[in-house]
Each structure stands twice: as structure tokens, then as C-alpha cells.
Image (cartoon, coloured by chain):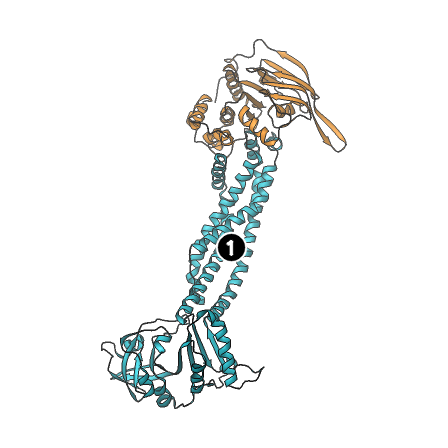
Chain colours: A orange, B cyan
Amino acid sequence: MSLCVLEKVSRTYTTGDMVVWALRQVDLTIEPGEFVAVMGPSGSGKTTLMNILGCLDVPSSGRYLLAGKDVTAMDDDELSRMRSEHIGFIFQSFHLLPYATALENVLLPTLYLDRPPDGRKKRALELLSLVGLEDRANFRPSQLSGGQQQRVAIARALMNDPELVLADEPTGALDTATAAGIMRLLSSLNERGKTIVVVTHDPEVAAYARRVIRMRDGVPTEESVRRDPRPLNAGAPVTP
Amino acid sequence: MRRFFFAILQALQAVRAFKLRAAFCISSVALGISAITVIVAATEGAYRKAYEMVDRFGPDAMLVLGGSEEARAIGRRDKTITVGDVEALRQAFPTAYLLVPMSSVREVNVSYGNRRHQTRVTGTTEGYSRSWSWPVVDGRDLTEADVKGARNVALIGAQVVREIFPDTDPIGKFLFVRNLAVRVVGVLEERGTTGAGHNLDDRIVMPITTVMKKLMNEKTYVNAVRIRFMDVRNMARHREEVRAFLRDRHQLKPGQPDDFRLLSSEEIIRFLVALTGSLVIFIGITGVMSLVVAGFVLANLFLLSVNERIPEIGIRRAVGARRRDILFQFLFEATALTLAGGVLGFGLGVAAGPLLKFVADFPIYFSWKAFAVGLALSSLVGLIFGLQPARRAAAIHPIQAIRNG
């Protein structure tokens, strides 16, 4: 079963009399285990696409199936549940809670689950160690570097073991070396079977993906599949 | 339920994180709650005092005082109740099981040996101690024979014992009341001080016949009559009957004011409640106003806080928080702050209580009621004034909230 299926998905915004098409009749399928980069200039619809993939927004027309469930007609509570169970988000500006520790930030997604997860603290610590921050569990975001903050955000995105990890310009606020470290971390997650979609305008970032979708005026215009994405040990040295 | 619990934990964490906001909210609520705590305590104190006084006065009792209220105020004659009135009342009201006339002389010099004291001498009849439920603890009570014979005998209060007989058994001793030699036959139980600071134990009780004839040179009038009725339920009716009866005997025309006053437990309660009422209204308005102000302070600070924390709301929504999870979190935050303010306010109120007692000699009684009212009101302020900011927070769309930039 495909993880994400978009069938003729459109998203329009109405401002006054003007109808703006952010997405036009998009057909797209993402299979489990893929590493997809969505590229395009600003205003191309790539962020709208990510919002819809992440159940933050719903199509104006067309159909979106996530993990076999039709998201199109879901209400706000059901969308929250879909996000909670199926999706992990990574943002350009990290969005960690400033007053919570790294560990508490990683635990955040479990607060909104209906079923109490067993050993959630243990799992959060394991994830922190996976992203190389096992010794920073009790640090607050202000005590961490940008790259470290993004690693905490990645651990948080993985906390509820989602099928789909969505990263919106994950390296936009980081220097090149740190960015490479983050991208290699995402690659290694993909190697372990996580489905990852990265939205970016940076070709360096897109180079890590196997499949690159270019957006223009709300339509995917060009799609390329790489046989040999940037290998894990390439690029600048890791500086977590 | 689990989510509810986590929402509370999240709220508490945020309360800790935004300390300045917390300090403002807590202190503004605390001021209002402290005023309200004092009110509740004062009201309760007043009622306790009233019931204590009523208890002492006797719920089945009535006091008829000579002289109208107006006449007393300007020092006109207050002698309107006659010995004849007392007898007539006795005949007319068979359910009045005790009917005791009283005439008092103040600041009477008494002495025993070289010890001197000034006290109040009350002339009355043999039912006195029963009519005030005031037992004779030592010696004997006054008898009918004492009164009929106008004997020079006395019951003395505990304060008089302390002043005149500090280390002598007073029973059987003769003391001088002015220049009258009077034999002490009994000692009244210690009663303490009234709410007005009046020492009840500083008195000598003698047969009314003796007092009128030998101390007052008075044949006709008594100061007051105390009546106790067997049927407590009919007190209101008895009151009207006694009033009509005395007006008739005093030949007062309709429209003319009473030339006597009737006092029953009802009046005592009414008086005390009125006294308390003015203060309660004053502090009450202040308290409610400051609570409302505290509410607006809270609402404003929370709106600011919500705007500041839009990214936080966005990320919470993105990882699966529903609108109501956000709503509850902010509501809990507001309520936690106002509750803390309520607890602090109760503490402030308790601290201010003795001050008020010192300044206004006000009966104040702190109980769980004052605490409960404070907590209830403070959480209400949090819920009411926290609702608008919390709703705004819940309405924030995650896409707007997490927009990069």
C-alpha cells in the first residue's frame, strides 16, 4: 500500500475576488521508504504541498489518502490525530519549547496520544542518543547550538514512530557543515526505512534524496530519480 | 483523562517558565482575595458573635427598658415602667414563666475593711439568676423572703470578689454598699466581658426592694423588666402583645411613640448584622473591584502571552494537540495562577485580620469557609478571564503558527 496518495489535489485561496491556485490538480504517490525532495521557488506551492501531506491543511478538491485513510473530509480533531500518529515534523526554525528541556521537548508528541505509551522516557533518551545528544537531555534550547536544536527536533519528530517524516527547509537556519550533518542524519533514518519528504530550495539538500520533485505554479513539473544519492560519508565532517 | 492530566502538567511548567507574568497575576488576584477573605471572616465573626450574644441573652427572653429611644438619647426621663406595670404583666401573660424587674445604680462605692471598689448595684427579685441563666456558684440565691423583707443581702460578681475579697471567703461577710451594711449570701459564676468591653462580673445583685428604698429613694419606677416565655416559637407575637399591653397601660394614643423599648434576640442579631454590614459592603465592593481589575490584568497578560507563544501553539498543534488541548492548557495556566493568588490572598487576609481587630475591634473568625470562598472566587476569575485568551490560543491555525521566518 502506498503511504501517500494524492488524486487531483487542488488547493485554492480566495482573496477578495481573486482565486489563487496554490496547487493545481496534483497527482502524486509516495511509497513507504522513499526519500523525496520537493523543490521549487517560493510561491511554487511546495509548502502548501507539505501542509497537505502533513495534514495541517486539507485539499479544496481532489482526494488525499494517508496510510490508506482518506484525510480529505476529516475535521480538525481527526487531523490532529492523524498528525499525532502518522507524521513527524521538522521545521527550519526548530520550534522547540524554550522553557522545556531537550528531553521534555522530545516527549512532547506523546502528551497528545490517546494510548499511554510504555517506557516513553526510555524511548526519548534512546532517540536523543540516536541523534548524538544523550548527554544534553536536561539542557534547554538556549543552551544548545542550532545544529543541536535541530537534532532535538528530529528526535521529537521520531518520538511517536511516524510513517512519514516531513522536513520543511530543515537546514535553512544552519551553516553548511552543520547542515550536512543534519542531512546525513536524515539519510541514515531513511536507510533504516523511514519515509522522508524534504521541502527545500537548496540543491545541496535535495542531493541527499533519491527522488526530486520540482514544483512551479502549483504543479509538479519535473521529476528525477537518482540512482546514487549523495552517500552517507560524503561532504563535510560531522559537527553535531 | 490522561490528556487532561498532561494539560495540567504543561500548564504548571509554563507557569514556572513565565515568572514575571505569574508574579503580576498572582499578586493582583491576591489583593482581591485577601479583601474577600476578610469579609467572609468578618461576616462569620459577626454571626458567631450575634449567636453567642443571643445565646447568652436567651432566645426565649425579652427585655423591656424604660424610656423611649429618643428620650434616652437626649437624657430625658427614662422612668416609665412602674412596679404596677410589672405586676400587671405578670397577671396578663401566664406563659411568661419568669418576670424579673431590675433597677440599677452605677458607680456605687463599696468597701470591706480597708478595701474599696466602685461597682454597679442591680436591684432585682429572686428569679434574677434563673432569668439570665447565670448560676450562683457559691452560697445561696436571693429568696422571695429577701425581696419581701427588703433585706440587706447581696450576690456578688467574680470581679467584686477579686477586688474586695481577694483572699477571704466572702459568704456571710458584711460589706458596705455606700453606708449600708449588706451581708454577702452568694457568688455569681464568672461571665467575662461583653462584646462592647463591658465587664459583666463587676456587679452586686440585691433585692430590688432594698435598692429602691435604701439606695435610690424610689417608690414607683423600675429601669427594666426581663421576661422569659415558655413558648419560644411565639416570641414575635408576644413582643407585639407586650407592646400593645404597655401602650394601653401608659395611655399612649395611636401615632405617639412608645415610651419604652423592647429588646429580644432578633434585635440583637439585627443590630450586629447592620454594624457588620456597612464594613462588609465597603470591603466587599473594594474586593470585588480589585478582583475584576485582577481579572483584566490576567486577561491582558495572557493575550500578550498567547501572541508571544504562537510558535509554541503551532508546534503543539503540529504534533497532535487538538484545539481543546490548547484551550485547556491555557485555561489551566490562568486558573493555576489565580488559585495561587487565592492562597496568597487568604494568607494576606489572615495577616490583616488582627490589624482590623486592633483598629476597629471587629469580630473576625477565619474558617475553612473563608478559605473555600477565596479559592472558589479565585479559580472563577481564572476561568472567566482566562477563557478569552485561551480560546484565542486554541483558534490559532497551526500553519500560521509555524510559518518559517
Where does the image place residue A120, in percent across and percent down from the top left? 44, 27
Q: Which residue is drawn at 49% across and 57% down?
A: B36
Where does the image place residue B90, in percent across and percent down from the top left? 42, 81
Q: Residue at x 41, y 90 (%)?
A: B219
> B80 or A182: which is nearer to us?
B80
Mark 1 highlights which residue? Answer: B32
| Residue ranking furthest to the top | A227
Density class for disc 1 (Cα within 10 Å; few <14, some 14-19, many ≥20) is many
Quarter occupied by residue B141? bottom left
In this image, B374 relative to A28: left or right? left
Q: Residue at x 57, y 41 (%)?
A: B390
> A24 or B121: which is nearer to us?
B121
| B67 lies above or below B11 | below
| B46 lies above or below B200 | above
Quadrant of the rendering where the C terminus of chain B is positioned: top right
| Residue ranking furthest to the right | A17
| A151 lies above or below B285 | above
Where does the image place residue A231, in percent across and percent down from the top left? 53, 12
| B89 lies above or below B327 | below
Where does the image place residue B383, in percent across and percent down from the top left? 54, 46
Question: Taking the image as drawn, is residue A169 in sight?
Answer: no
For mark 1, name the chain: B
> B170 or A208: which is nearer to us?
B170
